[in-house]
Image (cartoon, rainbow, N blue to C red):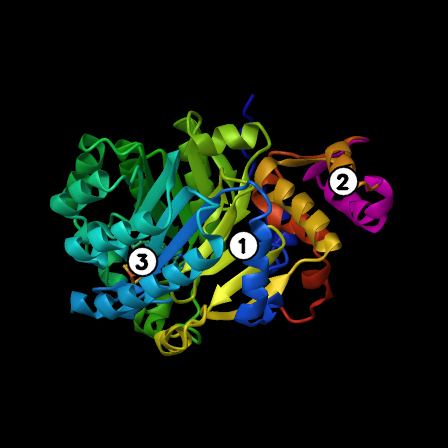
Amino acid sequence: MYQNTKIDFELIKKYDRPGPRYTSYPTAVEFKELNEEVYKEELENILKDDKELSLYVHIPFCENACWFCGCNVIISHRTDVARPYLEYLYKELGLLKNILKDHKKIEQFHIGGGTPNFLENEDMKSLMEQIKTHFEFTKDAEISIELDPRHAFYDKLMLYKELGFNRVSIGIQDFDENIQKNINRIQDEKMLKEVVSNIRDLGFKSLNIDLMYGLPGQSLDSFKKTVEKTLELSPDRIAVFNFAYVPWLKPLQRKIDEALIPPSDQKLEMFKIAVEMFEEADYAFIGLDHFAKKTDELYLAQKSQKLWRNFQGYTTHKGVHLIGLGATSIGMLDRAYFQNYKTLRDYYKALDNDKLPIMRGYILNQDDIIRREVIMDIMCNLGVDKNLIGLKFGIDFDEYFAPELEQLKELESDGLINLKPDKIEINPVGRFLVRNIAIVFDIYSKAKEKPTFSKTI
Ligand SMILES: C[S@@+](CC[C@H](N)C(=O)[O-])C[C@H]1O[C@@H](n2cnc3c(N)ncnc32)[C@H](O)[C@@H]1O
Ligand code: SF4
């Protein structure tokens, strides 16, 4: 039975220190320079197993600059800037196909950005044709796309449905007009409702909505209204992101009036409002910033201990090989991570030389693989089954993790977890602090003196 989350301000303050979000373990901070030879070897290695593919395609373009944006984007009003990019993407696809041949099918496909619906319909059509020419999709493949609702016109949505997309995600951020002005992201409520209604009418299987808290001008009341309006749209999943204000990394954020950004105790109150209102409406808090209906696969996977994380966040597809296509994309094979060049210049240059555009990556050792399993169970499945881990990796859990179990005792006495003989259980108080529990098993982040990651709040 689902137990509602407890947001305990005192404990959150005690544990509020920077920590990774574990879209991978080890995290991208550990990535080292790696060349395409290593990538090729690892790709050849995966031909020996029967796991299918998850393919991620990155479209970095957006038509308008949102001042809050922390993503890697290229702003342009001319949609034809995407054409050369797509040509290079097709070349990358061809190089991958040369190695993978017909051994692998796509079980999960995600196109993200930036803004994938920046592409003209004919370009999106040609992109999907290219993907389908190179790789076959499994019968029940999950095919998803991120959309900026301001450009999610009916003809585009219709095309996406025809092309086989079954899941969409839209960025709403906040419904309030004044807050939208403060972040240069004007999208009126009527239009947003129409986009959602079109998504429903066209029969997409699932809708996710992104919201943000901590935006300039937000108050507890305004945020409550945004949550209410979101609930009226009844999305299957909701992400409520903590606004990461990092003007030294994202100069566009300097356009934001810093004085309007709510202080951290108010931000915490906002998140508490989100948790309470979504749980009241029968959504489950999956973890970090994600909520899902209790009929949604995300929640069902968590209940059956099968949820996992990858570079796109929570996923129900554990045990597939994730391959990233396009600039900045990151792939996650069984025992190796690889990231493509970040700038278009470097990405194009590698492909001009007929090389897979790999910039850096990481090869996991056996200890990394064991720790990853434990960390992912904490982040995703609200507990660790010690016997399962022991059996899977041929270790005595209590012996292998003796120092970590000792360290966890303080977290147990604070009520975050229960340490049982056969499992570590995360309590409703600990659900918001999973990063702080997981970091105990992370030998790299613990060893670092300087914080590289954002705080829990
Ligand atoms: C690639 S965008 C989603 C698709 C589309 N570009 C849009 O904005 O609607 C990914 C999401 O990241 C979140 N995001 C962007 N910048 C952020 C920041 N600085 N801090 C926290 N979340 C952020 C937003 O909620 C946004 O919807
Ligand atoms: S929030 Fe979305 S639309 Fe806005 S700049 Fe970032 S990626 Fe582009």
Local SS, label 2? helix
Near mark 2 (Cα within 10 A), the count class, few <14, some 14-19 or many ≥20, is few
| 305 to the left or right of 218 | right
| Disc number for residue 332 | 1
Local SS, label 1? strand
Measured along the vertical axis of the image, is residue 332 above or below residue 161?
below
- Choose mark 1 or mark 3, whichever is in front: 1
Q: CA distance from mark 3 to mark 2?
A: 38 Å
Which amino acid, mark 2?
Ser
The answer to which of 161 and 22 lies nearer the viewer is 161
The answer to which of 410 and 50 lies nearer the viewer is 50
Q: Quadrant of residue 234?
A: top left
| Disc number for residue 217 | 3
Q: Is residue 272 magenta?
A: no
x, y percent for residue 219: 35, 51
- Choose mark 3 or mark 2, whichever is in front: 2
Observer able to see residue 226: yes
Which amino acid, mark 3?
Gly
Measured along the vertical axis of the image, is residue 219 above or below residue 304?
below
| Disc number for residue 38 | none
Near mark 1 (Cα within 10 A), the count class, few <14, some 14-19 or many ≥20, is many
| Residue beneath disc 2 | 413
Instruction: Tell me which segment is drawn in magenta.
Output: 396-421
| 173 to the left or right of 118 | right
